[in-house]
Amino acid sequence: MTPVLQIENVTKTFGHFTAVSDVSLDIEPGEFLAIMGSSGSGKSTLLRLIAGLERPSEGRILLDGRPTENLAVHERVTPMVWQSLALFPFLTAVENVEFGLRMQGLGKAERRARAMTWLDRMEIAHLAHRSIDALSGGQRQRVALARALVTEPPVLLLDEPLSALDAHLTVRMQSVLTGLQRELGITFIYVTHNHSEAFAMADRVVIMRDGRIEQVGAPKELYLRPSSRFVAEFLGSNNVFSGTLAQDATGRRVLNTGDGPIRISWAGGGAGEGSGGLADLVVSSDRMVIGADAALGNRLTGRVVGEEFVGSGINLFLETKAGNEIIVQVPQKEMDRVTISPGDDLTVGWPVEDGHLIFKGEAGHA
């Protein structure tokens, strides 16, 4: 199957600043792809390059196998739903939805019929003749989606479209978006800084850093097997321990850290993966438990420096003697059975197999 969109060695510079650097990526028909990154990572610039709002300084972008460098924006049929929504305040809801069809030269009757059909699909047909200023945030969001989808594009671009919505509306609109994408089979390319949004909706997630792609994969793959310390920390709620690979006196594989040896699940192997090699061990905070049970395999003690209430539980923040920060997700029902206060020493542990190793190379060459 030919990718609907091919990004080949694309670089975009603005003067001396490189916003996107040598990015290559194939996007499949009907895929929901999320692009994540912090501010300045290049994710929005990449989306603008796909939309044709910027031209690559190097490389090329192909849509259905056709180079796009000589295509006008309206010829690409890749509409964008903006973070600001960019609705026309002087038009009604239905007139906003009709706008793209008018640019395509459709007659008034057909424009109105198709626009009303899409407003009905968005469950806001009864608001068709209201001005944009008279609509709520969620209603405006639906108008923006209807305006983008009424032209039945092969690819829809979305630039942080839910960032201005309240939490309950965000969850509702996530359901609307995923339902539409599955129903229509349209490729969605969705830029966000919020990993919970990306993980809830996307088939694959792209994580960008300093204009480059750091890792691409399914949400579960990124969560369980981050390829770098940056990805592990960017996704949040991960504990990362740095050290040197070794064997202890019993022959068990360990990572020697400032807090002592930590047992690891590792078969050994390639370059930089032998004893003396440098590595990071990633342990998700939801895999760590309170207690000194020897069956856990690994145990560390730290001083409680804070806590965060997250509804269904508590995130406990600990600091070890070596200065490592540990985050432990504790279910609320467990917190109800114990008394933990800032300044307390607390032992936590995790099963050896729940740690994910990231090899960094040989000592002195990381």
Image (tube, helix red, strand yellow):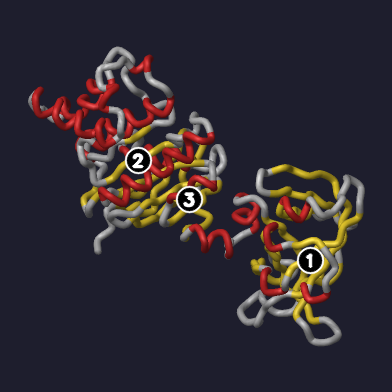
Question: For the point 76% across and 62% down, which residue is it?
Answer: 289
Please name which of the two marks, 2 or 3, marks the residue nearer to the observer.
3
Residue 16 placement (x, y as % from top left): 51, 36
**Residue named by callout 2:** 157
Q: Residues within 10 Å of mark 3 (few under 14, many from 20)?
A: few
Give 245 or 137, whichever is nearer the viewer.
137
Within 10 angstroms of label 1, few (less than 14), some, or many (20 or more) residues? many
- Residue depicted at 88% across the width and 46% down the height: 341
Query: Mark 2: which amino acid?
Result: Leu
Which residue position is annotated with label 3? 200
Can you say whether 62 is above or below 133 in the image?
A: below
Residue 70 seen: no
Amino acid marked by disc 1? Gly
Q: Is residue 17 visible?
A: yes
Q: Report the quarter where the N terminus lies.
A: bottom left
Whole-percent x and y of residue 216? 47, 58
Q: Is residue 109 left or right of residue 259?
A: left
Q: Give residue 14's position: percent from left, percent from top.
A: 46, 34
For residue 349, which numbered disc appears in the image?
Answer: 1
Label 1, label 3: how many angstroms apart (C-alpha)? 29 Å
The answer to which image quadrant residue 128 occupies is top left
